[in-house]
Amino acid sequence: MRHCLSFTVILILSLILFLSSHVYSRTLLILGDSLSSGYLISVEKRWSNLLQEKFDENKIDIQIINASISGATSNDVLRKLPNLIKKYKPKYILIEIGGNDGLRGYSPDIIKSNINQLIDLSLKSKAYVFLQAIRLPRNYGKKYITAFEKIYTDFKNVKGVKVIPFFPEAIFLNPELMMSDQIHPNVKAQPLMANFIFNELKKI
């Protein structure tokens, strides 16, 4: 009887230690579109999940909550952000949004206003904000591309926001790293994207 009791106590303590080792004190909330949601890619192979593994391997006490949705626009994310902040209380927020706005030809002024509101809401919650610059296909016309990409450069060194570059262009120019639609990175590209974000965040 004593032996069974001792074994039970040991089992319970082991379980407590296991669970406590997987409790994070800080959260990184990712707000993105299909590039961050891992479009058509299994969860464990998405770059956000691989980034979590890199955090864990390097003993970085951050849990990733990936709230990215394929097809999302800046307005979609703006509607969802208050509830996401309330639910997860993130310490860090990474904003990767605007690509779908640009592909649909939305006004750069409206996109910038939406992103500005996303930043303000994030800062109001006391979170540190990372804004990832977005690039559009070069066939969208020089005038529109210039106005669109200026949205992100305008936020550099403003309000304490840290602007990080878009994912490496080499990924999007390599057919072996892209899906057949030539828009979405495939499973082979996910580790490269995770490494890129990890290194950019480490710099900051």
Image (cartoon, rainbow, N blue to C red):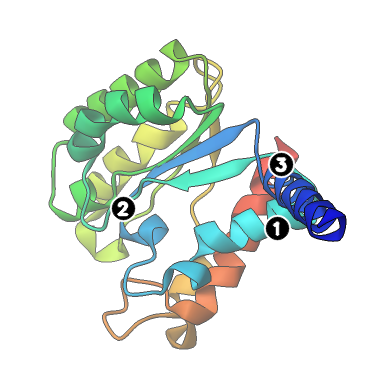
The residue to which callout 3 is attached is: 20
Quarter placement of the C terminus: top right
Residue 178: % across, % down: 40, 80
Discs 3, 1 touching: Cβ within 8 Å: no
Going by the numbered disc 2, the residue's amino acid type is Asp
The residue to which callout 2 is attached is: 33
* SS for callout 1: helix
Residue at point 35%, 82% (across, down): 179
The label on residue 54 is 1
Estimate the spatial distance between the alpha carbons at disc 3 and disc 1, rounded to whole Å: 19 Å
* SS for callout 3: helix
Packing grade of label 1 (10 A; few <14, some 14-19, many >=20) is some
Going by the numbered disc 1, the residue's amino acid type is Lys
Badge 1 or badge 2: first in the primary sequence: 2
* SS for callout 2: loop
Badge 3 or badge 1: first in the primary sequence: 3
The label on residue 18 is none
Residue 99: % across, % down: 28, 51
